[in-house]
Amino acid sequence: MMVKKVGLIGWPVAHSISPAMHQAAFQALGLHDWRYELAPIPPDIVRQGLRALRDEGGFIGVNVTIPLKQAVMPYVRPDEQARAVGAVNTIDFRDNSGMNTDVDGFLDDLAAHGIAVAGERVIVLGAGGAARAAAYGLARAGAEVIIVNRTFSRAQDLAASLASSAGLQHITAQTLDEAAEQGARLVVNCTSAGMWPQVEETPWIEGVPFPAGAAAYDMVYRPSVTRFMRQVEASGGQAIGGLGMLVRQGAASFARWTGQTPPLEVMFGAARAALASSG
Ligand code: NAP
């Protein structure tokens, strides 16, 4: 049996729950010759690492995580969305294409929770790769996007670069207190604050009133309920964790590589079980 390999590149990748999620999906669809493997690649040998996986490792494709999502861009053919976001999280080596399924994973999960953003004001916390994907997706979906970041100059750079490269309007950078005062339909945490093991961190500074009536989406999924989510719930808002986005971006990659409809419920179940067993 010729094994068909896909996997995850990043540095580090050891704590990923993606192998559990994809293996369960292969199993459920009877794709017994498919494997999902972890492939750690240090950031300074990205080109060589990609070549080794494709030419010698026999990989069909890979997911890409921190800190390589931007670094792989020169070595693949990014599609229009990945180019606009400036980051790739899925590669198909068969045509060396690069995609960004974080955007649709995020938008699909918002929709699954009944949150419509067209015409609404949304605060994006963070200015890294995840914030880029969220701000791009939200603006494309018709939201007015306000970017807030600990390092303010990075929020300004992100707003300017999305406006110029993707031609998106209605994206501005503001300070947290300015943004909070204006109110919003949704606040999205795209920072790593609160992610295990730094579970006591939060991107929402204590004492700043949370916008009345706003919901929150936390891209962090470990722990499943973050300190930020508890702050939002204490102020009466709906708070959604990032597991659904993780599963949906993985499902989109799975569909691309295998050509099969991903078994979403199986992937959710495996992802939850893997998180529970990793503490
Ligand atoms: P990144 O490029 O390293 O960006 C990190 C961002 O977090 C920066 O804006 C940084 O601010 C900010 N930050 C870090 N620690 C902070 C703190 N203590 N207080 C306030 N801001 C802080 O990372 P990324 O790729 O964008 O990922 C961000 C998070 O999203 C990670 O936790 C990642 O796991 C998660 N994520 C989840 C999914 C999913 O499917 N659920 C998908 C993608 C990413 P500075 O600019 O000031 O340094």
Image (spheres, grey):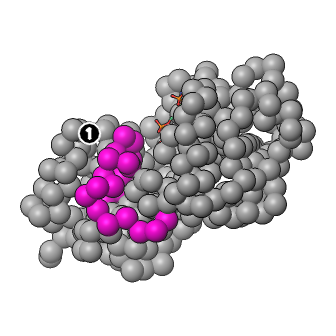
Q: Nearer the viewer, residue 68 or 160?
A: 160
The foreground one among 276 and 42 is 42
- Residue 41 in picture, x, y percent from top left: 23, 43
| Residue 66 falls inside the magenta stretch | yes
Q: Give the residues in magenta.
A: 62-81
Q: Quick check: 142 left or right of 64? A: right
Q: Is residue 252 magenta?
A: no
x, y (%) of residue 206?
Answer: 76, 20
Which residue lies at the image location 29% right of the left edge and 55% below the top edge? Answer: 74
Is 102 in front, or is 169?
A: 169
- Residue 105, how many percent across, how many down? 56, 60
**Image-quadrant location for residue 227:** top right
Q: Is residue 79 left or right of residue 198?
A: left
Q: Nearer the viewer, residue 25 or 119?
A: 119
Residue occupying the point 25% across, 43% down: 40
Disc count in the image? 1
Per the image, label 1 sits on a secondary structure element best described as helix
Rendered position, 45 above or below 204:
below
Residue drawn 60% across the image and 54% down it = 163
Q: Quadrant of the N terminus?
A: bottom left
For image coordinates 20% across by 55% down, the residue present is 50
Please give the residue where the numbered disc 1 appears in the rendered image.
43
Looking at the rendered structure, the kind of residue marked 1 is Pro
- Picture coordinates of residue 208, whole percent (x, y): 81, 24
- From the viewer's perspective, is residue 78 above or below residue 46? below
Q: Is residue 241 depicted above or below 138 in this figure?
A: above
Relative placement, left or right, of 69 versus 234 is: left
Which class describes the residues within 10 Å of circle 1: few (<14), some (14-19), or many (20+)?
some
Image quadrant assignment for residue 23: bottom left
Q: Which residue sits furthest left?
A: 56
Q: Is residue 24 visible?
A: no
Residue 238 seen in this snapshot: yes
